[in-house]
Image: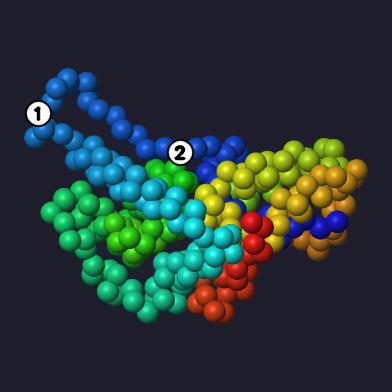
């Protein structure tokens, strides 16, 4: 029995070989009651970012209360094309020149750093955020975040997803070699998918939970014969899915087409 195609479409943070949750650090100095003029720039930025994330979370909750799973999948495909596909390439120069209409130095600086990252001139300004926060930024269309900021958040999500894929395939292959089965790996996939933001989960094809529960119902998991190793197979699948998700929505193959609506 083959594993569902959805095994190649997920994301998670990885430290070594164990998935972890990364969060924003908001450390302050040891001196109490610092004057406002001595406030650290990074503390001001975190405060501004926190306000933006709170507003984005409210908008995401409203959106997800109104959209079906298939509608969220179609919306995600359109958004991802704007951030990483042909639409982004077409308008890249205008996105690089754009700065938010604000006097907030920290917001302007973050927008510039996101543009620098998109052009290979610096680190991702969002690499320290959690997966949920990255998802909020990626799919927020309010204008609070620049396109290059949302692109940076999306690329960080994609990087973590690639790390997770390597982690989970290694884990399942090791379990198969030890026991001939892979239940623990499948349970971890199910738990992980259930914890995804709804707009991310909506992009997994078909009824993934039923597919994996069917696998767990089997007494022995029949692994297909590959010409290459399992890890190489999934890595190749991941590459193909990345390519298909970055084309205009009307031509999208895997991620672009709406997923089956399970409610």
Separation of disc 2 and disc 1 at Cα? 30 Å
Q: Is residue 134 shown left or right of residue 212? A: left
Q: Visible in this render: residue 206?
A: yes
| Residue at x 39%, y 73% (from the top left corner) | 88
Determine the residue located farthest toward the front in the rendered image: 66
Query: Which quadrant is the N terminus positioned in?
Result: bottom right
Image coordinates of residue 98 in percent, x first then y, are 23, 67
Q: Nearer the viewer, residue 245 or 17?
A: 245
Q: Is residue 89 shown left or right of residue 47? A: right
Determine the residue located farthest toward the right in the rendered image: 219
Image coordinates of residue 92 in percent, x first then y, are 33, 73
Q: Visible in this render: residue 232?
A: no
Q: Which mark is residue 35?
A: 1
- The residue identified by callout 2 is 22
* Disc 2 crowd, CA 10 A, few/some/many (<14, 14-19, 20+): some
- Secondary structure, mark 1, is loop
């Amino acid at each position: 029995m083959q594993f569902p195609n959805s095994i190649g479409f997920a994301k998670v943070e990885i430290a070594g070989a164990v998935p972890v949750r990364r969060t924003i650090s908001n450390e302050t100095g040891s001196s109490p009651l610092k004057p406002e003029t001595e406030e650290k720039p990074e503390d001001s930025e975190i405060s501004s970012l926190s306000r933006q994330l709170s507003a984005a979370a409210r908008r995401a909750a409203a959106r997800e209360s109104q959209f079906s799973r298939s509608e969220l999948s179609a919306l995600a495909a359109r958004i991802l094309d704007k951030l990483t596909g042909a639409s982004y390439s077409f308008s890249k120069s205008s996105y690089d020149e754009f700065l938010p209409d604000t006097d907030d130095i920290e917001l302007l600086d973050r927008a510039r750093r996101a543009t620098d990252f998109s052009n290979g001139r610096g680190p991702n300004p969002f690499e320290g955020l959690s997966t949920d926060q990255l998802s909020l930024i990626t799919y927020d269309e309010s204008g609070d975040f620049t396109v290059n900021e949302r692109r940076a958040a999306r690329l960080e999500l994609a990087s973590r997803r690639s790390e997770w894929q390597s982690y989970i395939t290694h884990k399942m292959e090791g379990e198969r070699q030890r026991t001939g089965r892979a239940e623990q790996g499948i349970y971890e996939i199910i738990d992980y998918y259930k914890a995804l933001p709804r707009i991310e989960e909506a992009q997994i094809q078909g009824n993934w939970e039923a597919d994996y529960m069917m696998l767990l119902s089997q007494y022995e998991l029949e692994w297909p014969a590959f010409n290459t190793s399992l890890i190489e197979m999934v890595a190749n699948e991941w590459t193909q899915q990345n390519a298909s998700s970055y084309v205009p929505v009307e031509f999208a193959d895997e991620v672009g087409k709406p997923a089956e609506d399970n409610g």
